[in-house]
């Protein structure tokens, strides 16, 4: 099942050229771009692992692209996303976030039914991949 | 701006380049070899874009440079201008300059240098990386110095990311020669070794005029003659730093000009406030020492 998280996720995967154009857009807006990766794709898993520091003071997307290729080389089968942080007073938040790498095989999510008090039925989901220990998924 | 292509084709036409070179002629006094090289580069980039239009193969020229020369010959000034020149020629995408020294590249403990250098390289991409006093990167007396690591990362980037980065090294001639001897790989990866000549007396005079203009001062006729005399005397002395010495001399002349006017500032008109006269220059220690025939460090 194809994971759809962040911007552009219902489109076909972005090419490097398109990623570069998006990063250029972020840098034009003075947003600090950073890379994050994870192999636990649960939608509530908000905080992914950072790949290096957020890149402040960048002027050109080439720096981000070289970092991205290094990240892909290190974690070829992880989910990788690009975040753009806006530090403007009042925003101070991520303005754009999109996936740039995903494993070839995405097994999807298991639906769990949980019996709660008074026969109340609750539901939760978890990725099939997280059955295996971290680092050996996908 | 064309985002899709890696390098926008020929930022300016032939006319634009001619205007650019004329700008350069106005802003920089002397420095004939430097201007000649910039002209060559500009011509090559134009020819390349014309070749591309005709479907001929085009190889991106390496534009990494090394500026050597005595103190105050304008190495840093030219490097600052080079970023905007290359941007106008369409060679670099963004045209910003990241000026760094040893401290910004070399870390303090094991494993600190590589991330630090990469960070700087990332910031400089799409523009010009200017490493001032590059010879300080190597400390031959300390074989465990981390400078070598920074150089290796730099070399790697210069080789693999030629489209993204222009590196300019600068330093004094003799020190840079030693630096390149210990790093032959670096020397061969720099296409342009440009030597900055010392300025002549006349050129220094023009530089003085160029410096005074934005400050809103001018020489009167007596001061001009006195300053020429001053330059002759100063050039004979040790530690003469070309344009930097001129700037310092002008700053001191402004000080003397100010203290001459002290006490009568209320009555001073526009002309008095902006004119440096001969006595402001002649009071200089350099000239007085020269008259006495004594050498005095300045």
Image (cartoon, coloured by chain):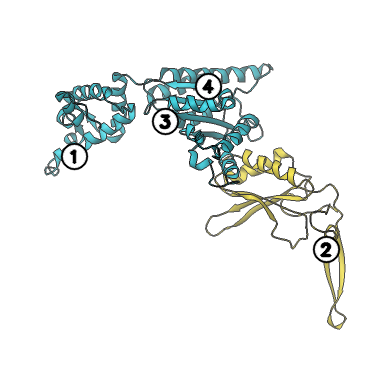
Name the front one of labels 4 and 2: 4
Quarter where residue B91 is shown: top right
Q: Cα distance, mark 1 to mark 2?
A: 78 Å
Q: Are marks 1 and 3 in contact (CB under 8 Å)?
A: no
- Bin the neighbour count of mark 4 within 10 Å (Cα to Cα): few under 14, some 14-19, many 20 and up: some
The secondary structure type at the circle numbered 1 is helix
Q: Cα distance, mark 4 to mark 3?
A: 17 Å
Q: Is residue A10 visible?
A: yes
Q: Is residue B220 visible?
A: no
Q: Cα distance, mark 1 to mark 3?
A: 28 Å
What residue is disc 3 on?
B77
The secondary structure type at the circle numbered 3 is helix
What residue is disc 4 on?
B192
Q: Between disc 4 and disc 3, whose residue precedes?
A: 3
Pick the residue in front: B273 or A137.
A137
Residue B215 drawn above or below residue A34: above
The label on residue B258 is 1
Chain in cyan (letter): B
For this view, does B270 lie left or right of residue B194? left
């Amino acid at each position: 099942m194809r994971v759809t998280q962040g911007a552009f996720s219902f489109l076909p995967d972005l090419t490097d050229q398109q990623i570069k154009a998006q990063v250029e857009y972020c840098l034009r807006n003075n947003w600090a771009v950073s890379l994050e990766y994870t192999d636990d794709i649960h939608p509530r898993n908000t905080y992914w692992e950072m790949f290096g520091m957020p890149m402040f003071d960048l002027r050109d997307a080439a720096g981000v692209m070289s970092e991205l290729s290094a990240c892909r080389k290190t974690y070829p089968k992880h989910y990788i996303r690009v975040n753009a942080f806006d530090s403007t007073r009042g925003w101070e938040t991520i303005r754009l976030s999109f996936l740039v790498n995903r494993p070839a095989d995405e097994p999807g999510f298991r639906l769990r039914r949980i019996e709660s008090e008074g026969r109340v039925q609750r539901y939760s989901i978890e990725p099939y991949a997280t059955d295996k220990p971290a680092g050996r998924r996908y | 701006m064309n985002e899709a292509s890696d390098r926008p084709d020929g930022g300016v036409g032939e006319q634009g380049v001619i205007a650019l070179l004329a700008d350069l002629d106005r802003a920089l006094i002397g420095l004939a070899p430097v201007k000649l090289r910039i002209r060559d580069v500009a011509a090559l980039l134009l020819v390349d874009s014309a070749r591309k239009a005709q479907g001929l193969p085009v190889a991106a020229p390496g534009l990494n440079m090394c500026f050597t020369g005595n103190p105050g010959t304008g190495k840093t000034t030219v490097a600052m201008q080079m970023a905007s020149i290359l941007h106008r020629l369409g060679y670099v995408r963004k045209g910003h300059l990241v000026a760094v020294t040893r401290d910004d590249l070399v870390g303090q403990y094991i494993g600190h240098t590589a991330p630090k250098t990469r960070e700087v390289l990332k910031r400089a991409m799409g523009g010009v990386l200017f490493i001032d006093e590059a010879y300080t990167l190597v400390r031959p007396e300390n074989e465990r110095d981390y400078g070598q690591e920074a150089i290796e990362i730099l070399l790697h980037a210069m080789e693999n990311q030629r489209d993204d980065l222009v590196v300019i090294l600068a330093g004094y001639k003799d020190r840079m020669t030693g630096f390149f001897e210990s790093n032959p790989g670096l020397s061969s990866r720099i296409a342009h070794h440009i030597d900055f000549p010392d300025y002549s007396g006349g050129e220094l005079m023009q530089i003085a005029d160029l410096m005074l203009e934005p400050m809103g001062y001018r020489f009167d006729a007596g001061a001009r003659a006195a300053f020429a005399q001053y330059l002759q005397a100063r050039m004979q002395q040790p530690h003469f730093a070309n344009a930097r010495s001129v700037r310092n001399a002008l700053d001191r002349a402004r000080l003397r000009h100010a203290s001459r006017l002290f006490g009568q500032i209320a009555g001073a008109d526009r002309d008095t406030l902006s004119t440096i006269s001969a006595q402001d220059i002649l009071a200089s220690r350099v000239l007085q020492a020269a008259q006495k025939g004594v050498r005095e460090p300045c």
